[in-house]
């Protein structure tokens, strides 16, 4: 029997759209009112859906993307059409590459009946104007224009379906004024049904023998290895990944975007692989004979640009689990492709390992002992710079101090640039899913908006945003939203007054990569936050104590050196994998 829609009387189109959002239990809409989208805000006035007002569309789109990746429900971003497709595109771009469910609601600002005259702000694609839909199509799974009230309701429902099912991602609905200015008639045609009836439960399982064959390869391997990608996070398969690794005694390395798919304090965890990976993880991967890849496309940065010393399908057996068939045997030929939801497939594998497929327990113990031994020999997650008292502060020392301070109830969000690769390489996550980073598209300005969303999703966790001075400056207006809605995030800035990655790539020809010194702590205070400037590494712990004790949004401006380079953490195949 069809679930009855909550749209049970004639109502304005945007009121009906808000009913759709209520039907999927949407908590927040992130955005700025503008154009014809003001009607959406009017409809939220008496709704359970809460609008979060930002100061720039980039912040809203990243908050929606992060909300989607953390909850599995579509994060909703709205703004006027012109500024959705300009200021607000960072979130969709990260979402399409990182498989985050996201719903974008925007308009054409069509100025009907004058849009064919290239009128002010009209985005219908007519001569003299721009085309909102065409731009949205370039960075979404699904994009549609609606002209009729009932079509608007069903198109939002279909957009939610596209955003959340299969390989998740962003979906966009572009409203024409003819849809917004009308009314939805629940007795009219097309018929309106409850949104949840359009959504499919994807608990699909694979052929049992296929899983048995893959598991036999793993348990009888000489040196098995598990690569955990962002797909483990998308599937919320943290517990299942850890259980599987423990049952077969395999080391788990993650891609950069998969960092914290397993807590890096776990005995089986060996850190990030690939370009920004650790010696221990890449060494174990290079020496493996059977590799299980979970939720990763095996991108060039994950494999040191397809280096055969690391992954070679001619000498290694590859097993790949992915929800999207096109991702299997995309970058490497796969011996055992397994298509489906990672959480469900790993659950099935664990059941088989507790029954029909048995791993030799002595072999499992020997494998784990070898992992622990090699981690100790190769100084897993340690560098001498972590003990440095130098000023300006070395980023490695800063990361050690943060790592020593946090507990398992802490979320870390990262920005792009050198601050991210330093953190990916040196920072040891203490709980699964605790690190959020823009490693799918890699845009600057990500850390603060992402931290805001993370704190809304996990109000009882500590949330730290780590950014460089370049990325911080791009979205520091997000702190105004933090103050307005009392969202107590702590932002730590690696402030070395340069674009580190750019400057270090320029070598001796330095141009347009250096800043004037800026006191971001004082700027934060002017916005209503607490602000601290730290120049001595021995002051970091006490400053963090004071920051979290305040219960307010806080900025800690840490004066770091510009003498440390991303090149120091870029994996060198030629020297690191030699016997």
Image (cartoon, rainbow, N blue to C red):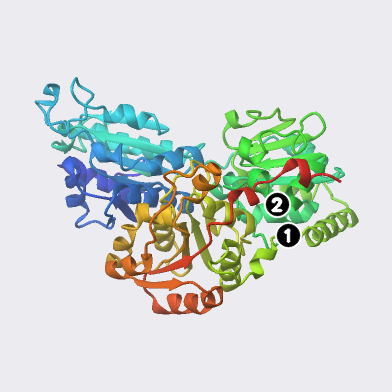
Mark toward the start of the polypeptide (1 vs 2): 2
Residue occupied by mark 2: 278
Q: Is residue 441 visible?
A: yes
Question: Would residue 468 be found to the left or right of residue 322 on screen?
Answer: left
Residue at left 21%, top 38%?
Answer: 186
Q: Position of residue 533 (x, y in %)?
A: 42, 71
Q: Is residue 99 above or below residue 488?
A: above
Quadrant for residue 553, please give it: bottom left
Q: Nearer the viewer, residue 477 or 564?
A: 564
Q: Nearer the viewer, residue 188 or 21?
A: 21
Q: Is residue 1 visible?
A: no
Q: CA distance from mark 1 to mark 2?
A: 8 Å
Query: What's the mark number on residue 380?
Result: 1
Residue at left 69%, top 60%?
Answer: 381
Q: Residue furthest right?
A: 362
Quadrant containing the N terminus is: top left
Query: What's the mark number on residue 304?
Result: none
State yes or no: discs 1 and 2 in contact (Cβ < 8 Å): yes
Q: Is residue 302 above or below residue 354?
A: above
- State the SS at label 1: loop
Q: Nearer the viewer, residue 74 or 85?
A: 85
Question: Would residue 178 be found to the left or right of residue 531 on screen?
Answer: left
Q: Position of residue 536 (x, y in %)?
A: 52, 74
Question: Would residue 107 be found to the left or right of residue 571 on screen?
Answer: left
């Amino acid at each position: 029997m069809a679930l009855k829609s909550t749209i049970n009387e004639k109502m304005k189109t945007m009121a009906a759209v808000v009913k759709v959002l209520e039907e999927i239990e949407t908590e927040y809409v992130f955005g700025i009112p503008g154009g014809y989208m003001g009607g959406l805000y009017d409809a939220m006035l008496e709704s359970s859906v809460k609008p979060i007002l930002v100061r720039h569309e980039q912040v809203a789109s990243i908050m929606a993307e992060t909300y989607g990746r953390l909850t599995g429900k579509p994060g909703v971003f709205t703004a006027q059409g012109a500024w959705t497709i300009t200021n607000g595109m960072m979130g969709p771009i990260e979402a399409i590459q990182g498989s985050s469910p996201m719903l974008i609601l925007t308009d054409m600002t069509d100025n009907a009946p004058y849009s064919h005259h290239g009128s002010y702000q009209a985005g219908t694609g007519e001569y003299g104007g721009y085309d909102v839909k065409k731009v949205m199509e370039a960075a979404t799974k699904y994009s549609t224009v609606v002209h009729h009230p009932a079509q608007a309701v069903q198109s939002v429902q279909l957009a939610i379906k596209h955003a959340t099912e299969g390989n998740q991602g962003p979906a966009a609905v572009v409203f024409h004024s003819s849809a917004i200015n009308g009314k939805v008639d629940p007795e009219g045609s097309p018929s309106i049904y409850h949104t949840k009836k359009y959504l499919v439960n994807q608990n699909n399982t694979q052929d049992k023998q296929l899983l048995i064959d893959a598991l036999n390869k793993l348990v009888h391997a000489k040196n098995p290895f598990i690569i955990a990608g962002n797909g483990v996070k998308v599937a919320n398969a943290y517990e299942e990944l850890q259980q599987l690794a423990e049952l077969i005694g395999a080391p788990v390395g993650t891609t950069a975007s998969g960092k914290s798919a397993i807590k890096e304090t776990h005995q089986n965890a060996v850190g990030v692989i690939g370009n920004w990976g650790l010696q221990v993880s890449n060494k174990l991967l290079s020496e493996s004979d059977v590799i299980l890849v979970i939720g990763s496309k095996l991108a060039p940065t994950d494999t040191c640009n397809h280096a055969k010393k690391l992954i070679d399908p001619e000498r290694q057996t590859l097993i790949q689990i992915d929800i999207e068939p096109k991702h299997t045997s995309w970058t490497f030929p796969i011996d055992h492709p397994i298509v489906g939801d990672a959480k469900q497939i790993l659950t099935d594998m664990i059941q088989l390992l507790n029954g029909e497929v048995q791993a030799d327990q002595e072999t499992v113990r020997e494998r784990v002992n070898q992992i622990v031994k090699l981690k100790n020999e190769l100084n897993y997650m340690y560098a001498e710079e972590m003990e440095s008292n130098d000023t300006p502060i070395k980023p490695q020392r800063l990361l050690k101090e943060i790592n020593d301070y946090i507990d398992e109830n802490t979320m870390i969000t990262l920005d792009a640039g050198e601050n991210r690769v330093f953190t990916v390489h040196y920072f040891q996550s203490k709980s699964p899913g605790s690190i959020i980073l823009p490693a799918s598209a890699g845009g600057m300005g990500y850390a603060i908006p992402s931290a805001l969303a993370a704190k809304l999703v996990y109000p009882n966790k500590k949330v730290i945003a780590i950014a460089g001075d370049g990325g911080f400056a791009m979205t520091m207006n997000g702190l105004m939203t933090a103050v307005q809605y009392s969202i107590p995030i702590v932002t730590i800035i690696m402030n070395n007054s340069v674009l580190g990655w750019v400057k270090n790539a320029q070598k001796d020809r330095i141009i347009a990569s250096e800043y004037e010194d800026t006191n971001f702590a004082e700027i934060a205070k002017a916005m209503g936050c607490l602000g601290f400037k730290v120049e001595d590494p021995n002051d970091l712990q006490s400053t963090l104590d004071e920051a979290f004790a305040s219960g307010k949004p806080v900025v800690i401006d840490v004066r770091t050196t510009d003498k440390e380079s991303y090149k120091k953490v870029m994996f060198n195949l030629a020297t690191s994998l030699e016997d």
